[in-house]
Structures are given as structure tokens and as C-alpha cells.
Amino acid sequence: MNITREEVLKIADISKIAVQDDEVEGLRIQLQDVLSYAERVTKLAGELPDQQSNKNINFFRKDESTPSYAKEVLSRAPEHEGDFFVVPKILDTK
């Protein structure tokens, strides 16, 4: 796929990005490389077996429960309230 200078300028305009004339060719090449890479990934993904039927299966480990250390971690926190850490307020919600 070949990207034209006009397409680069249109993308820049839609994105509200100021592009200098001497930057257009470099951006055109970069966009073309990105689209070429995406096309290759799409092609390779199409060659993979259908993953939808296996989307909820983890083949790498048995599904076993493991102990939780939440109470121990909370007990070491400087301050906690119930099952939650108390942290300093950083956002002003006016």
C-alpha cells in the first residue's frame, strides 16, 4: 500500500497535528512501514488456527487455587480500612 503526501497531510489535519513540509516524506515512509507491518501481522494471524473455541482455556498450567496473602499484606500496610489500603488523596474532586 502506498501512502501519498496528500494522505499524510489529511491524517495530520484530522489529528490536529502541525506538520512541516520537510517532515511529510519521513512521516509518509513511517506510516507506510506501519501499515506494511500490520498487513503482515494480519496475514500471519489469518494462518493461525481458530482461537475462539479455546479462548477460556489455559493450556500452560493446571487450574488450581493458591493461597492468598491479602491479610498478611494488609497487616503490613501503614494504614488500611477493611480489605482496602488507605492512600493519600491526590486528585481534587471539586
Image (cartoon, rainbow, N blue to C red):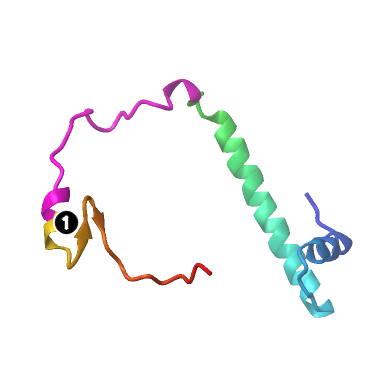
Residue 30 as seen in the image, left or right of residue 66: right
Main SS of residues in magenta: loop
Residue 84, image quadrant: bottom left
Residue 57, by quadrant, is top left
Q: Nearer the viewer, residue 5 or 73?
A: 73
Residue 26 against residue 20 in the figure, above or below? above
Q: Residue at x 84, y 78 (%)?
A: 21
Q: Is residue 64 magenta?
A: yes
Q: Which residue is disc 1 drawn over?
A: 74
Q: Which residues fall within the magenta stretch?
A: 52-72
* Lateral position of residue 51 relative to residue 81, left or right: right
Residue 79: x percent and y percent?
19, 65
Residue visible at 51% across and 29% down in the picture: 48
Residue 70: where, in percent of width, then height? 17, 49
Q: In the image, 42: left or right of 77?
A: right
Q: Residue at x 61, y 39 (%)?
A: 42
Is residue 52 depicted above or below 79 in this figure?
above
Q: Secondary structure at mark 1?
A: helix
Q: Quadrant of residue 22?
A: bottom right
Type of the residue with mark 1? Leu
For residue 85: magenta?
A: no
Residue 63, image x, y percentages? 23, 28
Q: Position of residue 31 (x, y in %)?
A: 71, 59
